[in-house]
Image (tube, rainbow, N blue to C red):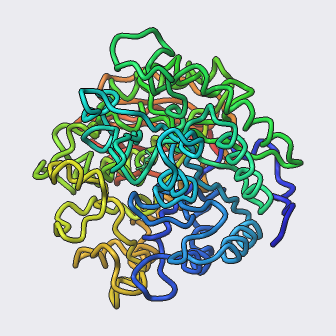
Amino acid sequence: MSNGVNVSSGPRNWWRNAVIYQVYPRSFADANGDGTGDLAGVRSRLPYLARLGVDALWFTPWYRSPQNDGGYDVADYRDIDPVLGTVEDAEALIAEALEMGIRTIVDIVPNHVSSEHEWFAEALAAAPGDPARDRFWFRDGRGESGELPPTEWTSSFSGPAWSRLDDGQWYLHLFAPEQPDLNWSHPDVVAEHEAVLRFWYDRGVAGVRIDSASMLVKDPDLPEVGDHEPGGHPHNDRDGVHDIYRRWRKIADSYAQPRVLVGEVWLPEADRFARYLRDDEMHMAFNFDFMTRGWDAETLRESIETTLATHRDVGAPPTWVLSNHDITRPVTRYGRRDSSFSFETKRFGTPTDLERGARRARAAALLTAALPGVLYVYQGDELGLPEVEDLPAEVREDPMHHRSGGVDPGRDGCRVPLPWTSGGKAFGFGGPPWLPQPADWGRYAVESQLADPDSTLSLYRRVIGLRRELRDADFAWIPTDPQVLAFRRGEDLTCVVNFGDAPAALPDHAEALIASARLEDGRLPGDAAVWLRTRPSHQ
Ligand code: GLC
């Protein structure tokens, strides 16, 4: 064990312009050939990540877990899931990455634990009314014999948010039944999470991504969800949740190299979202507003404007996210007639034009990389991987799919293991992958793309490199026709994105630095983006 690892002597504000790469460890690289990615696999691919130019890795949960929700059902925070490796492997990975200048962010899932967590086992073994149940939300049901759940609340994974035990009591789970919600008014719950933060900070992680961050605090009276004042929803975005993050911020700030808090905060109201980013709370939160919008100049301009204004008010950097392990891959999504994203409308059989989606996803990469703040890249998006939409029913694992009765395709399609080599076993991933890769995935493989200067991987590598120059350069829109977005970063760089069909004229410039598609007679084709150097570089 290596307590007190120094997270490098780098600048304290490294995160404000960082590129953060999301690793879904089960699907990244499989070193031991069992078909599931592992930490040794990630270690073996660190040179790839260093060459890509990322500043930090965010790992979705790597802890011991029965994997009922891809690891978001944590059984033991102080242990690594045996399928992925050991705590020693994690320590070695953190240290080796750091030597290459890459920091590590781990995922903390404070809203719930796995039903196999020792606290829940204790609660189940105890009788109704026993204090061992107070760390969760156990209640008697409604109806004559308690046969109705305590409330009508629904789970994010379909169906009721309550499950009943043989002894008649019900327990709350806002996600799957295997993910019982914790009671954050219980002192053990508060203390345990603070200890877990220190456990990982002491092992050198640079920060935490906080899962379902707005959902922790519940109204103990358990009212139904109805009309309510801001902050008055019974189980989301309650004002008390901010006290938790203020305490976490103090812990993060107590380290010589302060740790960073990143929130998964799904809230439609920009002002409620911004409250999580006040200067004594989180450092940043995922910009889902931008991520879920369709490929359209006006709607994206509006999101960018709101994002910049909201973050300016609280002094936090905006984040730009095109996808993650929950979201349809951009190549597939942007090829659809309605290219916005929502969990509610995701259905099988929605047509897509992958060629068009790929063009747009490349343009979106240039757009997001040019915007001020933090860029998140989900593994495989740098390869332009499409969503795998035709996975056979029997291999799908996601509870979102299964609990919807098979109506919702679920999230397995964006979690298929990465192709590393253009041929060979599992395209260089390792053993036979836990989710099968499509037969044509060799064309997306890292190996194939490295050899091609026009590949999406080459585009990502170059733009991540160029982005370093931008740092805190100011942002200003440049007036254009409605199908085009154009803005300046500082004096030197202009980014232009054409959402229309017809090629667009470019503003005056000295040089085109990088383009997502070949310019046509000096004009930018539709569904493409370009970075222009506005002044000759010798000035
Ligand atoms: C977050 C995670 C998602 C998980 C859910 C429950 O939304 O991103 O993958 O299923 O929380 O933990």
Left or right of 171 in this view: 84 = right
- Position in image of residue 383 (x %, y %): 40, 64
Give the residue at the far bottom of this rendering. 424
- Position in image of residue 246 (x %, y %): 72, 30
- Position in image of residue 111 (x %, y %): 52, 41
Left or right of 509 in this view: 331 = left
Left or right of 443 in this view: 376 = right
- Position in image of residue 130 (x %, y %): 55, 42
Q: Nearer the viewer, residue 103 or 125?
A: 125
Looking at the image, which residue is at 45% across and 32% down?
Answer: 266
Asked if 61 appears above or below 1 in the picture, the reply is: above
Q: Quadrant of the N terminus?
A: bottom right
Q: Is residue 513 visible?
A: no
Q: Is residue 28 visible?
A: yes
Q: Nearer the viewer, residue 348 or 408?
A: 408
Looking at the image, which residue is at 38% across and 44% down?
Answer: 175
The count of marks equals 0
Looking at the image, which residue is at 47% across and 71% down?
Answer: 28
- Determine which quarter of the picture holds residue 222: top left
Asked if 169 appears above or below 5 in the picture, the reply is: above
Q: Nearer the viewer, residue 348 or 74?
A: 74
Q: Quadrant of the C terminus?
A: top right
Q: Nearer the viewer, residue 165 or 518?
A: 165
Asked if 360 appears above or below 224 in the picture, the reply is: below
